[in-house]
Amino acid sequence: MKARTLRQDKINVITLGCSKNLVDSENLITQLRGNDYEVVHDSSADDANVVIINTCGFIDLAKQESIDTIVEYAGIKNAGGIDKLYVTGCLSQRYKDDLEKEIPEVDAFFGTLEMPNLLARLKADYKHELLGERLITTPHHYAYLKISEGCNRTCSFCAIPLMRGQHVSRPIEDLVSEARSLARRGTKELLLIAQELTYYGLDIYKKRELPQLLHALADVDGIDWIRLHYAYPSKFPLEILDAMAERKEICNYLDIPLQHASDNMLERMRRQITYGETVELLDQIRAKVPGIAMRTTFLVGHPGETEEDFQTLLNFVREQEFERVGVFKYSHEESTRAYDVPDDVPAELKEERAQMLMEVQQEISHRKNEAKVGQVLKTLFDRKEGKYFVGRTEADSPEVDNEVLVLAKNNYVRIGDFADVRITSAEEFDLFGEVVG
């Protein structure tokens, strides 16, 4: 009789949503591989028999993408294409009971902080010795470093505290250890992420300690760029800017989501800051770090947003001339503070306002990019795409910001290396150039 052969499980981890979710997936993959599982990430091949979907539940579009992906793999499971299907992440945290009823094909749902339970379901041990040894799915030369989890803010529109819980900082020594590990493996750029960077340290050190963390990370050999994402504007600790000005490793770049400019909307959104205080803060930032590139995001269509409110925002964007801007349309989220008031801005008007805001920013971005023609900019190259090598300057974060393109036939660079590039032409969101030297 022929002996039965047991197939070794192969796991495909699929990540949806933001960079914080990506870090969670990377930690999960590290643990699974530490338990001798074969694991792939976002694979389009059909050779994995176990699928884990790390979901996003932030806004309607993200939730729909997550649901569509779960339903797709539930169908594949029904057809015999996979053996097991697990769901984790923000959507699973928030709607676990509903999802279990609606999509019974899923073998189990897990919340955002339930990785040990997910591992146990797969008969894998949670290995504490792997903490700080995260395998990254980004190109080796840059990595996201999540410095805290959760958020204590009470913004009216935001469901993140419902899904991620209260703010919990990671100790400085743990973050430095992880940074050293990443640097040993070739990482040159750290992208610091959190729900709210400026709150870092208040829970474990009883004071804001982001500046101290920045200095400690800047001391790590091999790290050339440190980039800051998601800094809350209210009570912004200006000491961050002192560290930025003092240390060449800290990029002159700040992602500071402002969400709106109208006092009426800032109050409705519970942002704990006024129009005047916002302008004063921006002036201070630019004075302390001349030439800083600021990225911000705005939310249009929040309940109660009038045409006057929107025009205030539009004029604010024209006056401030941010280097980078993203725009979200308000999504009416259950259990948030804004959910108790009518979602009174029609969907068509939300879309119109988002488009108008981005058209204003497109003109600003084009003008700022044109001003860079002739300049020589230090550029970190991420990939080769078609006939171009594609990189980024200090003013640009991966995937969300501008890129620098140089023709491969006329220039040679190594992916993951820095090169000086003379800018020869510009478009709204791209720069073109040639390598110098």
Image (spheres, rainbow, N blue to C red):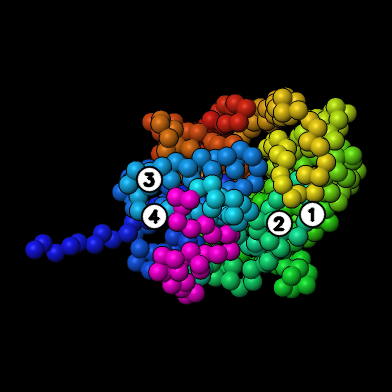
Q: Which residue corresponds to mark 2?
A: 161
Q: CA distance from mark 2 to mark 1?
A: 8 Å
Distance of label 1 from label 3 (alpha carbons)? 42 Å
Does residue 137 appear to the left or right of 237 in the view shown? left
Q: Nearer the viewer, residue 188 or 400?
A: 400
Q: Which residues are magenta?
A: 104-129
Between discs 3 and 2, the one toward the N terminus:
3
Residue 335 visible in rendering: yes
Residue at 81 percent across and 45 percent down: it is 340
Q: Is residue 349 magenta?
A: no
Which of the 4 image quadrants contains residue 262?
Answer: top right
Residue topped by disc 4: 84
For label 1, the residue is 154
Instruction: Tell me which numbered mark, 4 or 3, is placed earlier along the sequence.
Output: 3
How many marks on residues?
4
Question: Is residue 49 toward the left or the right of residue 258 in the image?
Answer: left
Q: Amino acid at mark 2?
A: Pro
Q: Mark 4 or mark 2, which has the lower sequence index? A: 4
